[in-house]
Image (cartoon, grey):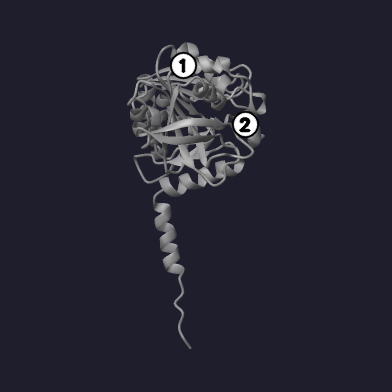
Amino acid sequence: METAVITTGGLGTREATITKSNPKTMLPVYTNSNYDTDPVLKPIIELIFDGLFDNGFRRFCIIVSSNHKNIIKNHLTPDEAFLELLSKRNAYHDKRFVKILSKLYKKINRSEIVWVNQKTPMGFGHALLSAKKFVENDNFLLHAGDTYFPSYEFLSRFVKFFKTDKKITCNLLLESKKLLDGYGIAQIKRQNGYNIVFNVEEKPKKPKSNLAILPVYAFKPVIFDALKKTNHGYNSELQVTDAIRTMIDNNEKITAMKIKQKWFDIGTPQRYLDALNYSFKVKHWYYNDFIDLMTTSCSLDVIPV
């Protein structure tokens, strides 16, 4: 599998007003530079692209809205003039910037990236449907552009599992959660070594399961037929979860893989803050050493009197 669809066209109204001019997927988190110990700020979309590219994906369809298209496209379009400008400067951080950007541009130049404009945001499913012409008959990965994974170690297993049975038309990524507000949920049963999905619901008021559906999916193109047959649901939008429900009703084989690792939906200010704080603590490795040092240095011995 080397085809991926990344959706970035949501309005982002829960994070107003920054998302009026700046898409959620361009919000930054911390990561390593691979050249020194100083942290680097990179937008979510770049980390998604990096993670998928490093797992073998080479064809990318990025769904964008009209007012945000140029911001995202400019970031993922090699700018050789800018690199040349930085190369003529002598400051350490300029040279570091050149190294980081050059690495990104090499990956972009080895990829096929197609930009599709979602004129009117009408749901996750509506955004996916606009990628049908690009996907054609390929199996593909769907990844929401407002999701931050500090690591993509799960992805090779996820794709490999999807390929184990040609009858599988969709593979879901699930996580057990106590608080399910704002998440689609899945119900599964164990059958012949597979987690078979027999029911899904989009943001139910009374969840029948504690398994949240993460916004990363492996699909066969049959999902597009299901989307066309699915009515608009939650928030009067066309939802991917509802289309999967249609696939289940059509006796398609839907499977799931459960994971236990950190990930963040950055769709609200609080969740984005959580992602930003976590990325700094994890990626800026000497932060933790500093905290340990300060804790040790500031500890007080209690002397009995």
Is residue 150 at least partly visible in the picture? yes
Can you identify the residue that label 2 sits on? 12
Looking at the image, residue 119 sits to the left or right of residue 152; the answer is right
Spot occupied by residue 296 in the image (x, y as percentages of width and height): 42, 67
Relative depth, front residue between 151 and 256: 256
Q: Give the SS element for disc 1.
A: helix
Given the image, on which type of amino acid does mark 2 rest?
Answer: Gly
For label 2, the SS is loop
User: In the figure, residue 259 lies in which quadrant?
Assistant: top left
Q: Residue type at mark 1: give it.
A: Val
The residue that mark 1 highlights is: 222
Viewer-side residue, 134 vs 251: 251
Q: Residues within 10 Å of mark 2 (few under 14, many from 20)?
A: many
Q: Picture quarter containing residue 189?
A: top left
Gap in angstroms between the C-alphas marked 1 and 2: 29 Å
Q: Say which quadrant the N terminus sits in.
A: top left
| Front residue of this view, candidates 101 and 154 | 154
